[in-house]
Image (cartoon, helix red, strand yellow):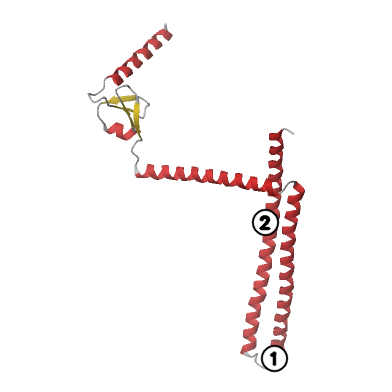
C-alpha cells in the first residue's frame, strides 16, 4: 500500500509538471528554472528567481530551445574563471607531458641509449668543473702573489701602495666569483643526477606500459 501511495504521488507530480509545460502563453513560450532545493518552477515571464538560478526557454512542444546560465556575482565570476584557468592549465600540462613522453620514447630505443646520453651530460658538467677548478687555482695563486707583495711592503715598514690594495680587492672578487661558480656547477650536477634518476625510472615505466599495450 505504501508503495502504491508513493507511485500515485509521483504520477500526480508528473501530471502537474506536464500541465505546467502544456499551459503556454499565446506566443508559445514558457520559462522553467530549478531553485536551490532542486524543485522545478514554470512561468510565463522571467522572474527574479529565474534570473538568479538560470532558466530554460521552452516552446509550445515542451522542448528546451535555449538555456541561460544563472547570473553570477563578481566573486562567483572570479571563482569560475579561476577554476576554468586551473582546468585549462592542467589540460595543457597533461598534453605537454604526453608530448615529452612520446619524444623520450622516440629518442631512445632502449634503456642503455638513455643511460649513455645521461653519462655524456655528466661528463660535460665534470669537464666544466675541471676548467673552473684550474681557473680558480690560477686566480688564487695570483691573489697570493699580490698578498705577498703587500706583506713585503709592510715588513719593510712601508705603506702598501693604493694601486696594490686596489689590485688585491679586485683579485679577491675574481677568486670569490670563481668559487661561487664552482659551487653552482656542483649544485647543478647534483640536481642533474637526481633528475636523471627520475627520468630513467619514468622511461622504464613508459617502456613497461608500452610492452603491456603490445601484449609481448
Horizontal and vertical percent position of residue 73: 34, 42
The residue at the point 24 percent across, 29 percent down is 45
The residue at the point 49 percent across, 42 percent down is 87
Residue at the spot of label 2: 191
Instruction: Please tell me whether mark 1 or mark 2 is closer to you in this view.
Output: 2
Horizontal and vertical percent position of residue 83: 46, 43
Give whichever of 78, 108 is nearer the camera: 108
Image quarter for residue 51?
top left
- Secondary structure found at label 1: helix
Most extreme residue toward the left, as rendered?
Answer: 26
Q: In the rendered structure, which disc, 1 or 2, sits on the residue that comes first in sequence?
A: 1
Tell me the tag on residue 58: none
Q: Is residue 154 left or right of residue 79?
A: right
**Please, is residue 134 above or below residue 159 in the view?**
above
**Please, is residue 161 above or below residue 206 in the view?**
below
The residue at the point 74 percent across, 65 percent down is 127
Give whichever of 41, 93 is nearer the camera: 93
Q: Is residue 91 left or right of residue 106?
A: left
Image quarter for residue 166?
bottom right
- Secondary structure found at label 2: helix
Give whichever of 49, 145 is nearer the camera: 49
Image quarter for residue 2?
top left
Spatial CA distance of label 1 from label 2 is: 47 Å
Residue 43 shows in the view:
yes
Residue at the spot of label 1: 153
Horizontal and vertical percent position of residue 18: 32, 18
Q: Is residue 3 left or right of residue 146?
A: left
User: How busy is the neighbourhood of tag 2: few (under 14 within 10 Å), some, or many (20 plus)?
Assistant: few
Q: Quadrant of the N terminus?
A: top left
Horizontal and vertical percent position of residue 7: 40, 11
Q: Are marks 1 and 2 in contact (CB under 8 Å)?
A: no
Give whichever of 198, 142 is nearer the camera: 198
Amino acid at each position: 500500500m505504501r508503495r502504491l501511495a508513493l507511485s500515485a504521488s509521483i504520477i500526480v507530480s508528473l501530471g502537474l509538471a506536464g500541465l505546467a509545460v502544456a499551459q503556454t502563453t499565446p506566443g508559445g513560450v514558457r520559462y522553467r528554472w530549478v531553485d536551490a532545493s532542486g524543485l522545478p518552477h514554470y512561468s510565463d515571464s522571467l522572474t527574479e528567481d529565474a534570473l538568479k538560478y538560470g532558466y530554460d526557454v521552452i516552446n509550445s512542444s515542451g522542448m528546451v530551445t535555449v538555456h541561460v546560465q544563472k547570473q553570477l556575482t563578481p566573486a562567483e565570476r572570479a571563482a569560475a574563471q579561476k577554476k576554468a584557468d586551473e582546468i585549462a592549465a592542467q589540460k595543457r600540462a597533461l598534453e605537454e607531458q604526453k608530448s615529452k613522453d612520446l619524444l623520450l620514447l622516440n629518442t631512445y630505443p632502449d634503456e642503455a641509449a638513455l643511460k649513455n646520453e645521461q653519462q655524456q651530460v655528466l661528463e660535460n658538467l665534470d669537464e666544466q668543473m675541471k676548467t673552473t677548478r684550474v681557473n680558480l687555482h690560477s686566480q688564487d695563486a695570483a691573489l697570493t702573489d699580490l698578498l705577498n707583495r703587500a706583506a713585503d711592503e709592510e715588513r719593510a715598514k712601508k705603506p702598501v701602495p693604493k694601486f696594490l690594495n686596489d689590485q688585491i680587492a679586485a683579485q679577491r672578487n675574481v677568486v670569490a666569483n670563481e668559487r661561487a661558480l664552482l659551487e653552482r656547477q656542483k649544485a647543478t650536477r647534483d640536481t642533474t643526477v637526481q633528475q636523471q634518476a627520475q627520468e630513467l625510472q619514468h622511461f622504464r615505466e613508459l617502456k613497461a606500459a608500452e610492452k603491456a599495450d603490445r601484449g609481448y
